[in-house]
Image: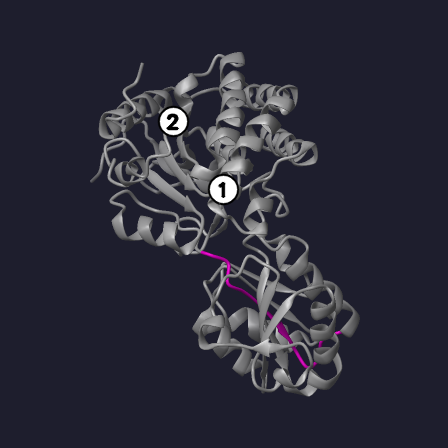
Amino acid sequence: MTDMTNIPALMQDIGARAKHAAAELAFAPAQAKQQALEAAADAVWAARADIIAANAKDLEFGRDKGLSDAMMDRLMLNEARIQGIVDGLRAVAAQDDPVGQVMEEWDRPSGLHIKRVRTPLGVIGVIYESRPNVTADAGALCLKAGNAVILRGGSESFHSSGAIHACLVQGLAAAGLPQDAIQLVPTRDRAAVTEMLTMIDYIDVIVPRGGKGLVGLVQREARVPVFAHLEGIVHIYVDKEADPVKALKVVMNAKTRRTGICGSAECLLIHRDVLDTIGQGLIKALLEAGVEVRGDATLQAIPGVTAAQDNDWGREYLDMIIAARVVDDIDAAITHINTYSSNHTDCILTEDDAAAERFFQRLDSAILMRNASTQFADGGEFGMGAEIGIATGKMHARGPVGAMQLTSFKYLVTGDGTVRG
């Protein structure tokens, strides 16, 4: 039995086993990985009653901790959401295997033939907060890309993650793959996170997925490379050439469909020319839907709008709250977004191609959208089956991180007794 009190020893053991599993997974046949994920999907569905029972314990823990309604919604699993987890596992299983794909190949005048081929990264550490479905998504994507993974879920989702993880391990066993390929850190102790961040001998990359506190901690203290998933400070700019019907549909969906996800809109920017038409309509519709609108001085003239404070700009609410302000033109909108954005997802509503092009060119968020709900900022919606996070940095992976982004590459060079002159 592992000693849960000696966290460094516990984590070293998990790391060593992950490294050993990764060496085997690197050349596991595509068929075996697909079989493992399909068997895991079957196992999750078969265990749905147990998973929901485990989730009830987590919900009770969350209530005792005083989690907000939006955070409780992120945590909650029901049969429909478990079906979503199963669908995600099957979608990743069905994807083309990225490992071994030839990215480029060419011949050199020297007689060398060179191929660039996709390879796994090795061992991935995923540190995430409340959403238990991340356990399945992250486990599946890492496995698909031939990586071993060490999962450290949030303390809120401890029981749900454990129940889902057990199903992933069943899938590995069914396919004859090493069961240490997907490990879940078996303690809520925060020391396990600190330990992971410095395990340079065992972990090749860390993916933090959660709020500013978690990602900030990881970025400050990690000695292992990081794919940061920063918070989603998502802006929607309503241009003077916006279509009123599209604007209403997109803004309402982007804010209210699910407020607790990272693609949820947090700030609305309205062009002064459409303030009295589209702008008024949007603000009233948001207020009627129960959204608290924190507006600038101009928007405070609309009954029901509360005054925005300085700290409302660049804030991720993950709740039925939106900041809103009037801007003089598209460049003022771009300046505001450049000042407060987290480089996650930003959107323009316009029928003017030149305005959309300017917005796309001058902003550098991982995802830029036009006339579409920012709730589509999601690997599943991008056709990646699932995602391990939305990378907001610029190195290696950017935007939704799917199986393809969890690979590196190597060069395979072939000669025929070829020597360099």
* Residue 361 vertical placement versus 366 (above, below): below
Q: Residue at x 50, y 72 (%)?
A: 337
Q: Amino acid at mark 1?
A: Asp
Q: Nearer the viewer, mark 2 or mark 1?
A: 1
The C terminus lies in quadrant: top left
- Which residue is under mark 2? 186
Q: Nearer the viewer, residue 410 or 415?
A: 410
Q: Amino acid at mark 2?
A: Pro
Q: Nearer the viewer, residue 261 or 65?
A: 65
Label 2, secondary structure: give it. Answer: loop
Q: Nearer the viewer, residue 34 or 104?
A: 34
Q: Nearer the viewer, residue 312 or 247?
A: 312
- Which residue is under mark 1? 64
Q: Disc 2 to disc 1, how far (Cα)? A: 21 Å
Asked whether residue 241 is drawn in magenta, I would say yes
Q: Which residues are magenta?
A: 231-243
Asked whether residue 404 is drawn in magenta, I would say no
Residue closest to the far right: 245
Prevalent SS, magenta region: loop
State the image coordinates of residue 269 (x, y, percent, origin top left).
59, 76
Other-residue count near label 1 (Cα within 10 Å), few / some / many at <14 / 14–19 / ≥20: few
Label 1, secondary structure: give it. Answer: helix
Residue 206, image quadrant = top left
